[in-house]
Each structure stands twice: as structure tokens, then as C-alpha cells.
């Protein structure tokens, strides 16, 4: 998770120790920990199974085809919380990525270094019963179920690696807030056009049963064609469903847009005003004008 996104989550976290049993786990220099898979309780495995069953039922005709296909390929339907080591062995054979367990959100430079080297940091703890529908920080269900299937897609996985390298450069240029907006509106809350209509690819939507329906079917939000500079100027909502979703045409086009030097873009948007999360502007290709109810 990108720096500004991480900071926003941290701002609304209450007491990570009370909900995250990995909070005090020994950390390696790269902030990874031992998942200690055998320590998960039967109740925690059952919680994963119920979350998985509910989300899969909702997403079968709402998630993009690439997500559904890779969810099956990676055997995420196997009972219980995935063992990240075994999952990584399957994933690495496809795109060279591995999933590494972490206790909580990691520092910016560490996060970007992991992505740039095809490692995805995933929280090891699983949400409690009281957080089945709303979570304050990313847990293993959000990170594994929401993010990992698309890391088995060659084009999307290249985009994620490019994002990690871009994050390292953005830190140097002092433009992380703008890059964080790209992550938020694509990796977390992105939609994609398909022959069957709009579909979900963002992990924040995938791992939320209620937002999976809202993002595609509600009259409330705006849905706007993806424009890189527009996205980087747009604020986002932390503690509610999104007021605007951006829609990409394909993962190939998203990757192509991001295979460029962002420095000139940062220079241009540095002289422009930010755009509010609900706001439409004249240059938008509006697919759905929301009621913002």
C-alpha cells in the first residue's frame, strides 16, 4: 500500500495491538515476518472460508475475467487461510512474484522496494468477527484475496513492478501524494471496460462485499474514463464508498501509460489545483454521472 494511502489508514486505526496478533512479531530488515501458518486457529480458518465464499458468490459476474481465472489457478478456494510460502511457489512459476508476510503497514521505501523486486507485502492477521464488513487496515483477506490473483496476470504484474519503481522515484521528487492517488484509483478501486460491461479489478472493491455491488450498480458514484494526470490530481475518500471510480480500457493500456517518465507530469500537476473526489471537470469522459446521494 502506497505512502499517502498508508498514512490515511494509520490516521483512522484505533489500536492495532488489540486486533493484530502479529503486531509484536520479530521483523527482518525488510520488515517481513514468519507467517507461522500453523498458529492460525480453527475459527480464523473458518472466518477466511466464510469471507471467501461470500465474496466469490458476489464477484462471479462482477470481477474481471482475469481475476476469476487466476483465483482458480492459484487455488485460493482451498479451505482455510493460505500458506503464503505455498501460494508464492505457485505464483512465482507464473509471473515471478512472491507474497511476503508482514505484521502491518510497512515504511514507504520498504514497500516500493518489495514491489520493484516482485514481492507483495501481505498482512498476516485476519480481521475479527466484528470487522467482517468494514476493516480499518488491510488484513490477509484483503491482501491475498483482493490483490494476489491479478499478480498472476503477466501485464498487470508488470504494472505493479513499474509502480514500485515509480514510487522510488516519486520519493526522490517529493510527489508521493500524487502517485498514491494512482494506486488508490487503480490498484485499490479500479474498474475496467470489458465486452460484458464494466467489471471490477481494484482490491479494495474485491474484498468488500458491499462495495462490490455499489461500485457497479449504484446510481450514486461518478464513473469516469481513466486519465493519468486527472487521477493524480484527484483527492479520494478514506472512510466511505468512493464518490468517483476511474475506468481503464485494458491492463495493457494502463501499463503503457505508466511506462513513461512521470517528472514532466509532476511538474504540470504541481502548478494545477487538486480536484475534489466528487467533482467532474470539462475534459472528463463521463461514463456515468453520479447522483452523489
Image (tube, helix red, strand yellow):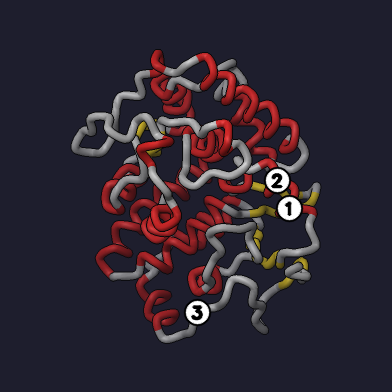
The answer to whether the residues at label 2 and label 1 have Cβ atoms under 8 Å apart is: yes
| The quarter of the displayed image where residue 190 is located | bottom right
Q: Is residue 148 left or right of residue 164?
A: right
Q: Secondary structure at mark 2?
A: helix
Residue depicted at x 52% and y 14%: 42
Residue 179 placed where, x, y %?
Answer: 42, 63
180 or 55, which is in the foreground? 55
- Residue that badge 2 annotates: 210
Instruction: Say above or below: 160 vs 83.
Output: below
- Residue that badge 1 annotates: 214
Mark 3 Cα-neighbour bin, 10 Å: few <14, some 14–19, many ≥20: some
Q: Earlier in the sequence, mark 3 or mark 2?
A: 2
Residue 95 placed where, x, y %?
Answer: 46, 33
Instruction: Say above or below: 46 vs 68.
Output: above
Q: Which mark is residue 45?
A: none
Q: Is residue 219 left or right of residue 172?
A: right
192 or 145, which is in the foreground? 145
Q: Secondary structure at mark 1?
A: helix
- Residue that badge 3 annotates: 274
Residue 86 placed where, x, y %?
Answer: 43, 18
Residue depicted at x 51% and y 35%: 148
Observer able to see residue 139: yes
Amino acid at each position: 500500500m502506497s505512502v499517502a494511502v498508508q498514512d490515511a489508514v494509520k490516521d483512522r486505526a484505533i489500536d492495532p495491538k488489540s486486533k493484530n496478533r502479529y503486531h509484536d512479531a520479530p521483523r527482518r530488515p525488510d520488515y517481513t515476518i514468519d507467517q507461522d501458518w500453523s498458529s492460525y486457529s480453527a475459527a480464523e480458518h473458518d472466518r477466511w472460508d466464510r469471507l471467501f465464499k461470500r465474496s466469490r458468490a458476489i464477484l462471479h459476474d462482477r470481477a474481471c475475467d482475469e481475476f476469476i481465472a487466476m483465483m482458480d489457478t492459484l487455488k485460493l478456494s482451498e479451505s482455510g487461510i493460505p500458506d503464503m510460502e505455498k501460494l508464492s511457489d505457485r505464483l512465482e512459476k507464473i509471473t515471478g512474484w512472491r507474497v511476503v508476510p508482514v505484521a502491518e503497514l510497512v515504511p514507504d521505501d520498504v514497500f516500493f522496494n518489495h514491489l520493484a523486486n516482485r514481492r507483495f507485502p501481505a498482512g498476516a492477521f485476519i480481521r475479527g468477527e466484528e470487522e467482517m464488513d468494514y476493516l480499518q487496515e488491510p488484513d490477509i483477506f484483503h491482501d491475498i484475496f483482493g490483490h494476489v490473483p491479478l499478480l498472476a496476470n503477466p501485464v498487470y504484474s508488470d504494472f505493479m513492478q513499474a509502480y514500485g519503481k515509480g514510487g522510488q522515484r516519486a520519493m526522490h521528487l517529493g510527489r508521493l501524494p500524487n502517485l498514491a492517488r494512482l494506486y488508490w484509483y487503480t490498484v485499490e478501486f479500479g474498474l475496467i471496460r470489458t465486452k460484458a460491461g464494466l467489471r471490477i479489478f481494484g482490491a479494495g472493491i474485491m474484498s468488500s462485499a458491499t462495495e462490490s455491488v455499489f461500485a457497479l450498480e449504484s446510481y450514486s458514484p461518478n464513473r469516469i474514463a481513466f486519465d493519468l494526470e486527472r487521477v493524480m490530481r484527484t483527492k479520494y475518500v478514506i472512510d466511505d464508498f468512493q464518490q468517483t471510480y476511474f475506468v481503464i480500457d485494458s491492463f495493457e493500456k494502463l501499463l503503457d501509460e505508466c511506462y513513461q517518465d512521470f517528472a514532466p507530469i509532476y511538474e504540470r500537476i504541481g502548478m494545477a489545483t487538486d480536484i475534489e473526489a466528487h467533482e467532474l471537470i470539462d475534459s472528463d469522459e463521463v461514463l456515468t454521472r453520479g447522483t452523489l446521494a
